[in-house]
Image: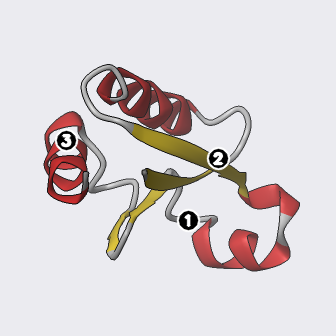
Amino acid sequence: MLNVIYYMKDNCSLCDEANALLTVLQHDYTFTIEERDIYTNDDWLEEYQLLIPYVKINETELDCEQINIDILEKVIKENV
């Protein structure tokens, strides 16, 4: 099964929107969402703090400026 890794933090409206998009796409595609709060790991915080929400789907990585419903659906379709 496809696993989508989703880097986020609490109290982040962009993160909430990205999570909502992923949840909507789960109605049409089978995948799991692995949420990773960047404040629980120093390496994640250093790497993603200016890029969240950040999504990894296999070899494809999307930062906050690339995340929208069309791009997420395209990448998920290519990987399921």
Seen in the image, is 43 located left or right of residue 77?
A: right
33 and 63: which is toward the camera:
33
Residue at horizontal 40%, vertical 34%? 22
Q: CA distance from mark 2 to mark 1?
A: 17 Å
Q: Residues within 10 Å of mark 3 (few under 14, many from 20)?
A: some
Q: Secondary structure at mark 1?
A: loop
Residue at horizontal 54%, vertical 29%? 16
Q: Secondary structure at mark 3?
A: helix
Where in the figure is residue 72, as x and y percent of width and height? 25, 46
Q: Give the residue furthest to the front.
A: 1
Q: CA distance from mark 3 to mark 2?
A: 18 Å
Where in the figure is residue 73, as x and y percent of width and height? 19, 41
Q: Image quarter for residue 27? A: top left
Q: Secondary structure at mark 2?
A: strand
Where in the figure is residue 34, as x and y percent of width and height? 61, 49
Q: Is residue 74 above or below residue 39?
A: above
Where in the figure is residue 3, as x and y percent of width and height? 48, 54
Q: Which mark is residue 36?
A: none
Q: Which mark is residue 50?
A: 1
Q: Earlier in the sequence, mark 1 or mark 3?
A: 1
Q: Earlier in the sequence, mark 2 or mark 1?
A: 2
21 and 27: which is toward the camera:
27
The amino acid at mark 2 is: Glu
The amino acid at mark 3 is: Glu
Judging by the rendered image, the residue that carries numbered circle 3 is 73
Judging by the rendered image, the residue that carries numbered circle 2 is 35
